[in-house]
Image (tube, helix red, strand yellow):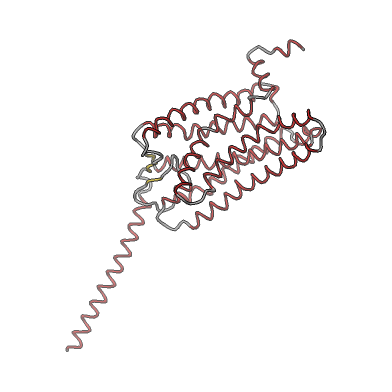
Amino acid sequence: MFDLETQGKRRGCWMLMYLGMLGERNGKRNVHLAVVNHSSLVDFLLLGISERPGLERILFVVVLISYLLTLVGNTLTTLLSLLAPRLHSPMYFFLSNLSFLDLCITKSFVPQRLVNLWGPKKTISFLGCSVQLFIFLFLGTTECVLLTVVAFDRYVAVCQPLHYTNVIHPCLGRQLAAVAWVMGLGQSVVQTPPTLHLPFCPHWQTDDFVCEIPSLIQLSCGDTTYNEIQFAVSSVIFLVMPLALILISYGAIAWAVLRINSARAWRKALGTCSPHLTVVAIFYSLVISVYLQPQNPYAQKRGKFFGLFYSAGTPSLNPLIYTLRNKKVKRAVRRLLGKDEDSRES
């Protein structure tokens, strides 16, 4: 009888232990589901530089000025490329695509950023973060590919000037631009859903100004191995490879120019390539600082400011870099304003 009572107690203990383990598993599962299912109900907190309110006011003024310059400069460049007959060439068609892209980037991110810098509200909804991430990946990838296309255009213009119109004809220009936009869209479609399906930590705080893949991966409480591998592969395809192609193009241009014993030809080649080289240098230095940085607090804070300058500063500089010393653009502006002195003299 004693043995039967002891066995009954043991069975009861095992049953309690089993039910406890089952309840613990269900509890963890419920917590995980709560994190995932409440994704659409909780706002992300974009910390930015909220610990330094004085610097926020200064950045607000700088970003606002850059925003207005971007709207004016890129709108004017796009309209000139469409309205001026002298600018109906593949080079200015690509330039109008870049200007339109800069307008889209600026309008998609800067207004939200200005609100966060000026007021106490630093949050963005899950839907807003999703849209921001999708657009950022779409436009950023498109810009990488477009800069590569422009480098190819400059290579043909300098190394094969007599065949330029036959190689870079308008139909090919439209096709290359379409490929750039489609590749950007495909990259965004592939990268955005896995990032947004991550189980995020309950505090929902990201130390950034916008919703980007690196900051959202850091916010996750689950396994991010797949996302990190996917992000690394896409960085190689859409950052490293385009940069390598651009460097190869300009290496061939430099080799061709060095074989020419003419100072005038050198100046012409420099005038043709220097604006695009400047834009590429600024763009890739900022992007590499943001996306290919080491994982330490100093690099993250630095990358945060570089990301801010990429989306707010460079779009305002690009029209100045491309058009400041461009005689065709200046003549097109004078013609549209009715002050084309060159046409009267000829």
Give left or right: position of 19 versus 133.
left
In-image side of 321 versus 36 (left or right): right
Residue 124: percent from the left, percent from the top? 39, 39
Q: Quadrant of the N terminus?
A: bottom left
Q: Residue furthest left?
A: 1
> 112 or 169: nearer the eye?
112
**The C terminus is located in which quarter?**
top right
Q: How many marks?
A: 0
Residue 245's spot in the image, x, y percent?
Answer: 68, 45
Relative to residue 239, is residue 9 depicted above or below?
below
Give the x, y percent position of residue 247. Answer: 68, 43
Q: Quadrant of residue 61?
A: top left
Whole-percent x, y for residue 266 in the image: 76, 31
Q: Return the residue found at the far top.
A: 344
Residue placed most toward the observer, 257 or 317? 257
Would you place residue 148 above or below residue 224 in this image? above
Q: Nearer the viewer, residue 299 or 273?
A: 299
Residue pictured at 48% horizontal, 37% vertical:
308
Residue sitting at x 33%, y 57%? 31
